[in-house]
Amino acid sequence: MARSAAKPDARSKLLAAALSVIRTKGYSATTVDELCAAAGVTKGAFFHHFKTKDELGVAAADHWSETTGAMFAAAPYHQLADPLDRFLAYIDFRKALLQGGVPEFTCLVGTMVQETYETAPAIRDACDRSISRHAATLVADIEAAMAERGMTPTWTAQSLALHTQAVLQGAFILAKAKAKDKNAAGVAADSVDHLKRYLELLFGRTPSSIT
Amino acid sequence: MARSAAKPDARSKLLAAALSVIRTKGYSATTVDELCAAAGVTKGAFFHHFKTKDELGVAAADHWSETTGAMFAAAPYHQLADPLDRFLAYIDFRKALLQGGVPEFTCLVGTMVQETYETAPAIRDACDRSISRHAATLVADIEAAMAERGMTPTWTAQSLALHTQAVLQGAFILAKAKAKDKNAAGVAADSVDHLKRYLELLFGRTPSSIT
DNA sequence: CAATACATACCAACTAGTTGGTATGTAGGC
DNA sequence: GCCTACATACCAACTAGTTGGTATGTATTG
């Protein structure tokens, strides 16, 4: 509930460290000590802000939702006039984010939920919230694109929005499986291209690029 | 090196336990003691067969490749005459496997690679092998389907085969994010439906079912 | 054939180091 | 003086891995 974001306090430093360390090593293998070292704070500070490691896990997922949510809200694809254009530009935007090292472009909650879905329900729910809410930001445009074309398919806009997230999460896994010297971002980008081609075919638009 | 497979020895009991426990809790959170308890063997037996925990991780990935490889090799979809039919029937087969609890239908190597891609290269490579080789079993049919139709697309058969694996891996993540009482297999199945629809559109076949 | 030699498969107890978490102290603002 | 926000010191439980040992097979040799 605290405000006044002047300089980064221990809590936000810990959350920032969590995003980076957990995406690199996974949740279980990330130790509290390591998080404290990466954040430059002591263990006392950690347990002052978070009762348990799992509570930090939940907070990290929520923090991830907030920061990525703000980033996508500010992204340029929203400025396009046509709903389908916006949706496709969102896919392009996701592809453009596949830059740098694997830990930098992969998803925190996709990583965490794999390790915690059976053992830490609170973290799993936080990850579910993060994915579901992000997918929900796509639904209105998908529905508008469907309505414009008078489509009454067997699938729902929500299922298609979730499918886009599935493709992205799966692309991250393929990227992680590639050795570092191989082009990890490339295999992820290939899958995003297939996803975009699906959407174009589905909405009756000629597949665009030689990408 | 293998012997007459009469009764399960400690090594195969440990590998079987690993498939189940790691898929439930993740690799890092799975302890050697827990594996031994699940397999009904002692720690001495564990370190007799595997020098380190990571060595078991590699062996588990290889074991996963072998057992699932044999299962897919024996699956009925191979009996269809047309290459595209075979490919689409493979997708149906994957969808039909989405039964039971999440730990039972999800993928061991997809789970493990997320936790080990930066910290245990040997495990990451074993996971990469497993995914790549499975994807490779689809390439011939995809290429035949492309050739039959005289297609010369911007994408390759291999990238499409990998894309199918990305969708499946991503579907598993979405399923893990759902609370237990919700229909976890259902959201995964929805994504597989979208994947099948993509393939039908791509190869110019009318999307089939009301599924 | 039997004794020796060695290998494989496994077990129970132990260890050194790590883990999440706690107890207690303190500096600075209100 | 009291609360918040940390820091220091510490611990009990757990961790991967080790040790010394046993039981059982198998190949060799006299």
Image (cartoon, coloured by chain):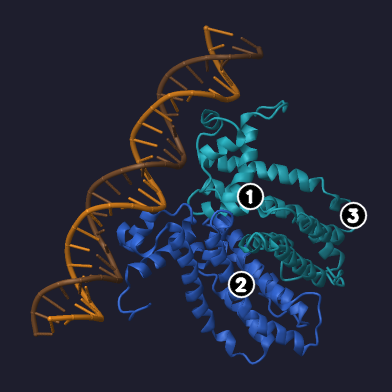
Chain colours: A cyan, B blue, C brown, D orange
Seen at 65% across and 39% down, the residue is: A16
Amino acid type shown at disc 1: Leu
Mark 1 Cα within 10 Å, few/some/many (few <14, many 20+)? many
Chain bearing mark 1 = A
Labels 2 and 3 share a subunit: no
Give the residue number, with chain letter if any, for mark 2: B132
Labels 1 and 2 share a subunit: no
Give the residue number, with chain letter if any, for mark 1: A108
Percent x, y for residue A190? 74, 67
Tell me, yes or no, whether the two marked residues, 2 and 3, touch with CB atoms within 8 Å.
no
Amino acid type shown at disc 2: Ser
- Residue B23 placement, left or right of A92: left
Of the residues under marks 3 and 1, which one precedes in the sequence? 3
Percent x, y for residue B68? 51, 75
The furthest residue to the right: A81
Q: Circle 3 — which element? A: loop
Q: Circle 1 — which element? A: helix
| Residue B41 in sight | yes
